[in-house]
Image (cartoon, rainbow, N blue to C red):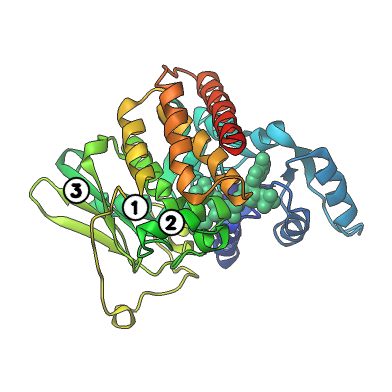
Amino acid sequence: MLKTVAVLGSTGSIGRNTLEVIAAHPDRFQVVALAAGDNVRELAAQIQQFHPRLAVLRTAAGCAELRRLLPQAPELVYPELLYGAAGLRAVAVEAGAAIVVAATVGVAALPAIHAALAQGVSVALANKEALVAAGTVLMAAAARGGAELLPIDSEHSAIHQCLRSGHAGELARLLLTASGGPLLRRPLAELAGVTAIEALRHPTWNMGARISLDSATMMNKGFEIIEACHLFGVREAQVEVLVHPQSIVHSLVEFADGSVLAQLGAADMRLPIQYALTYPERLPCPGMRLKLEEVGRLEFEPPSLERFPCLGLARAASRAGGGAPAALNAADEVAAAAFLAGEIGFAEIAPVVERTLDRVGAPPVPSLEAVLAVDAEARRIGKELIKGRKSA
Ligand SMILES: NC(=O)c1ccc[n+]([C@@H]2O[C@H](COP(=O)([O-])OP(=O)(O)OC[C@H]3O[C@@H](n4cnc5c(N)ncnc54)[C@H](OP(=O)(O)O)[C@@H]3O)[C@@H](O)[C@H]2O)c1
């Protein structure tokens, strides 16, 4: 039987890779809904290839443009077009998907992801910011709805795969690998002058702008620590980070007896995406195959908190709990956007996040509304701090 799939963020890096995986298995999957932000042309092409019954853009103007772009032919069946938050929610819970691939960036799709989990629709999650901001609320919704929450992040997919060889109670530590990003060997004194182009040039992965920049600051790895705590029920102290520049070992699990299992693969997101879509089965994958003889060396080293202060901030937010991780994500998004716009320097990203965290604290966040209120407050404070630095 065909598995019905909805994709939130279909025009992005993960979204496009997801559709490649689906196109490789036409006998397995059927796309029922696609949601994008503003890339109308790419969505129009996807609609003509996958024929979803629902398509969503960020704005009404985008939908009007999409109507103009879709060829008019009597034999073509057009999807229903919606926009904005209501559209994202419809993609997640009204299009009849058995699984929703959450591949948007930031918290735009957080209410839609929550709705899917609460209604028992499985979610394949790439959009880690949603779990960072609202992990407790989302995990509770998944437990209530009986929905499966499967990671797409290659590190968490690796851990998910390694954990299949032991019981939850036998788990001792998780070892998350990190490429180190483009600034791993850059002299510390030069970090203040790093440009946006340099910070976005990821050495091993081809990804969207936000995650590429978050990899350069290692905030991305900090988010992944928080994500791992929610997905696998561990404490922050049980999650180690290892810099592994080759990005071949995607992560490792240490069990109670000291045995360490790792998952290896080429740096190609189609494998973890397909794993989440086909779990518990494995199928041939259109992704690249690993040739260890070509890789040659696998290196590991501890990360420097002096070079990557965002990693320390994320650990502190994870320990503080409550609304602190939501504030961490929101402040990072605001600071990252300001850096990319040339408003602050690379070395100012971490201080903006730190001061925002100091001011927001860790208020209780028992509901999605409370999470979104912390998110809005942290954005307001972050922007105020950036404005203050510019005028100082
Ligand atoms: N890329 C990777 O290899 C990778 C690996 C692990 C985890 N992740 C995570 O996966 C998520 C997506 O990353 P990415 O690299 O694929 O990002 P990306 O290339 O920037 O794509 C983001 C997607 O979200 C859509 N979008 C943005 N705002 C939206 C809104 N308000 N409403 C609807 N759609 C919206 C974009 O649409 P438009 O382009 O049409 O505007 C695009 O389809 C992130 O959370 C990232 O951390 C990515």
**Counting other residues with Cα less than 10 Å from the Cα at mark 1, is it few (<14), some (14-19), or many (20 or more)?**
some
Task: Residue 352 in the image: state x and y as whole percent.
Answer: 48, 36
Identified by mark 1, the residue type is Arg
Above-or-below relation of 111 to 199: above
Residue 102 position by quadrant? top right
- Residue at 64% of width from left, 33% of height from top? 89
The residue tagged 2 is 191
Task: Residue 296 in the image: state x and y as whole percent.
Answer: 27, 80
The residue tagged 1 is 307
Above-or-below relation of 275 to 369: below
- Residue at 52% of width from left, 63% of height from top? 198
Task: Residue 18 in the image: state x and y as whole percent.
Answer: 56, 58
* Measured Cα–Cα span from mark 1 to mark 3: 35 Å
Nearer to us of marks 2 and 1 is: 2
Q: Is mark 1 within 8 Å of ligand 1?
A: no
Q: Secondary structure at mark 3?
A: loop
Q: Which of the marked residues, 2 or 3, is nearer the chain's N terminus? A: 3
- Residue at 36% of width from left, 31% of height from top? 317
**58 relative to 106 in the view: left or right:** right
Question: Do the numbered discs 1 and 3 sit on residues whose CB atoms are within 8 Å?
Answer: no
**Counting other residues with Cα less than 10 Å from the Cα at mark 2, is it few (<14), some (14-19), or many (20 or more)?**
some
Task: Looking at the picture, tell me which residue is in the foreground, 343 or 139.
Answer: 343
Question: Do the numbered discs 2 and 1 sit on residues whose CB atoms are within 8 Å?
Answer: yes
Q: Is residue 131 visible?
A: no
Identified by mark 2, the residue type is Leu
